[in-house]
Structures are given as C-alpha cells and as structure tokens.
Amino acid sequence: MNARRSGILLHITSLPGKEGIGTLGDQACKFIDLLADTSQRVWQILPLGPVGYGNSPYLCYSAFAGNPLLIDLFSLKDDGLLEEKDLASMPRFDIRQVEFDRVERWKMSRLKKACTNLTSNPGSSLCSGYGEFLDRHGWWLSDYALFMAARAHFGHITWHGWPDGLKFREQETLDHYREKLHEEIEFHRVMQFLFFSQWQKIRNYASRKGVSIIGDMPLYVGGDSADVWANTDIFRLDGNLFPTHVGGVPPDYFSETGQLWGNPVFDWDRLKEKGYHWWIARIHFSLQMYDSVRIDHFRGLESYWAVPAGEETAINGEWVPAFGSEMLALLREQIGDLPLIAEDLGLITPEVDALRRAFNLPGMKVLQFAFGSDPKNEHLLHNYDTNCLVYTGTHDNDTTWGWLHSLSREEKKPVFSFLKMYDRRPVWALIEMAWSSVAQQAIVPLQDLLELGAEARMNIPGYADGNWGWRFRWDQVRGKHRRFLKEMTARYNR
C-alpha cells in the first residue's frame, strides 16, 4: 500500500438491481467498472455477515458467514439452480431503500429451491465444488449452520432460551439436533457455498480490473451469534452464559450518553491462554476474503469500555486492558506486514496510537471532524502523516451535504475559510481537499461524490431502526461525476 491511491466507500446492499437489495452479481461488476474507468483503485465495503435485528452489518449472526440476502438470484439461474419462472413473479421493490423484511420473505423461498436443486444433483461440477467448500470451511461452518437451524427451530429466540443441553453444548444433545435438523443445516451450508462462490467471482473481477477491496471487521460480535454460542469461554459471561459486561464507548461526538452496543466483551486472559487462536483465525479468514481489512473500533485492542450488563446507557463503564499487541505480534510472525487499517476515531489515547504505530497500521482522518477546534486538529490536512486514509465522511456520518447544511452560521465559517482555495462547490471541494492531501489513500462515500443530502445517510449511531437501507441508482451517476473523479485522481497523483 505504498502508492497513493483513491476509491469509493459503498456497501454491497447499496448497489442497484431488481432484487430489492444489492447483490453479488452483474451490478457489483458494473460498479467495479465505474471504479476502473475513473482510475479508482479501491472499493471499501462494510461487513458482509448475516444481519440480525436492526439489519446492522456490525451486528451479525457470525463473524465468518456471509449474508444470504446478498446472493444474486440471476446468477443462480445462469448456474442452472433456478428457472426463469422462479424470478418472473419478483415484486417491485423500492429502488431507493432496502426493504429488508420484504426482500427476505420473497428471496428465501427461491434460495431454498436453489439448495434443493444443488444437493439433488450430486454429479454436477457445482456440487463437486460444494464438497471442497465443506472441507475447507467446516471448522466454522458446522457450528454456524447448526446455530441458524436451531434458531429457526426454536422460533428465532436467542440461544440463551434453548434447552440446556444445546445451550451448554453437551455433545449428546449437539448430535441429536444435528440429526433432527439435518435439512435446515444443509440449507445453511449450501447458502454459504453459494455466497462465497459468488463473492470469489466478484473478488477475481475486481483484481483483473486493478481494484483492491477493503473489507471491514467489527471488533465485537453479536451476543446472539454462533461465535459466542460456540466459544463461550473467550467472553465475559456468567454461569448461565449471559454477559457480565457489554461493549460500547463513553460519551463522545456521536452521543452524550455514549454508545451502548450490548455485545459481550472478550475475556482477554482466556484468549491469551488459548494463544489468541479465535482472533488470529478470524483475521486470517478476512485476509483471504479481502485485500486489506479495516478493524472497526481498533482502540478496543488496547483497552475496551466495559459496561455492567443491565445498564441503560454507556456512561457507567470502565476501561479494561486488552492484549491486542500480543495477538498482533503473533499474527505478524505468521504473515509478515499486516494489511490492516486501524479505525482510530473517537477518544484515542497515546497508548492506542502507539499500538497502531508499532505495527505500522494506517489510521483514519475524517474531514467532517476537521473544523471544530483549532489548527492542531488531527483531521486537518496539514497535520497528516502519509500513513493514513482520509475520508470526507464515513458510514456513521451524515452525508457531507447534509452535514454542511446542519452547521450553524458560525460553524460554517472555518469550513468555508479552508474551502475558498478550491474552485468547487462545497462537497466537491472537500473531496478535492482529501485527494490533495498527503494521505496514502483517499476515500469518498458514493453519496458525497453524488452530492446527496441527509436522505442518503447510511447510519445514525445510537438508533436501532431505519438505518443501512440506502441504495443508489445508475441515473444518479452522470458524466460530470465520472469526469470530476478522474480529473482529481490524475491531478493529485492517485
């Protein structure tokens, strides 16, 4: 990652298409073409896991599995797993927002048919590939498939409400339910095979086009996940396997009461005893999927904000040391330089910064944070070193247009004082500012390139509902956007 480069932040779900949600099909390839045609060499996405309540990609049922809703049905038809008639009755979905529940209700029946068609034809080349997939991924897939099957069997309640034998993973009970729920387990295994098969095609296409993909790894996993259920000893849980402490962050820019995520926090002493095997396996797995990986809430690898379970806000927590330095050192011994990116936003201590620098990991700068204090603000261009990524905003920010319009007259003054040197409209001026910086990589959310307002915001931290649904339309991407992006990339040697 030594060369200067630039790219676009866009989640897979935000892609256009007829299926009501972005998928791993032709539209993903078309977006890669847009990147390549405008000289962009980076596509940054959000986590790809199967989402739970609130549809947040940062709160998934597995740290390893892919979201079946992202599987492209038209590609399955091309593979002979679906017929034209299976897609003929497709509803007219909203083209501006993902209707998650409606998409899932319609899509799952088609995915189940594709699963049946694959497993009923064991002699096909696709089925042969399925066997190889199971051999490579069984170490996580077995628990995930049983978890999802059991969750459906028990009415989608959390695993804490399952029968004790299954909740506490007694071998006899595990064997019983693997036999009892065999068909549903097989469905979830096939879904993962189809997901990863399609993802690999997208990854290969991007590589041929000279586009690198930055993946995203949440620090924590959801409490109602296969990861916690199958690895209870590496989390801080009580005798009934409920969290004693949950994760979050103290009061900050985004919230006066902090953010209470509710995820169980790691037991770093136990992780150390086990050689950090779960964390290292997770990073290895992610680096096979992506060219580089952003670790969300990186500061949690140095110390984490632990809030006693049952608290209504994140105010009454405490910082507890983590052993991320030891874990990353072991990983570096195995693979050399770490192609990781540290999300180091928010309250960052000298110790966290030292951890990032010790492993030569690039951090993040966000221009929306740059103008609210003084010339020493770390997000202002003149304070950068080269080992960072600069963004106009992230998925947690308002769009830059929305942000600018939300500022008071006094708050706008320092912003426009900096922007007057760029002969652009404000949002594009901020993009040019990012591209002109010394930051090794410059990333713009597609919403900002298109100068969209707050209606296109991806997420409002602290709000469980109404997020993650924004989708773009190709008629929004015009020649002026392509010309501007290509011109800025050439002008600033990216």
Image (cartoon, grey):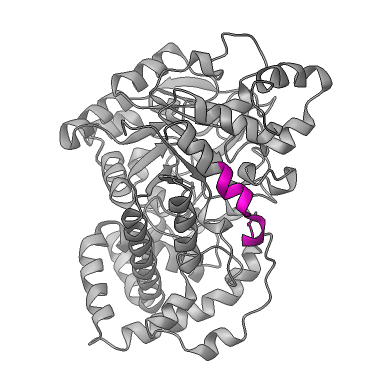
The answer to whether one can see residue 296 in this image is: no
The answer to whether one can see residue 459 in this image is: yes
Left or right side of 413 for 76: left
Q: Which residues are magenta?
A: 471-484
Say if 305 sits above or below 427 in the image: above
Q: Does 342 appear in magenta? A: no
Say if 67 sits above or below 81 in the image: above
Indicate the quadrant containing the C terminus: top left, top right, bottom left or bottom right: top left
In the rendered image, residue 331, in percent from the top left (x then y), is placed at 22, 34
Q: Main secondary structure of the magenta part?
A: helix
Name the residue: 64% across, 30% down. 429
In the rendered image, residue 54, in percent from the top left (x then y), is placed at 62, 52
Q: Does 480 appear in magenta? A: yes
223 and 446: which is toward the camera: 446
Q: Could you say which quadrant of the image residue 184 lies in?
A: bottom left
63 and 81: which is toward the camera: 81
Name the residue: 60% across, 72% down. 18
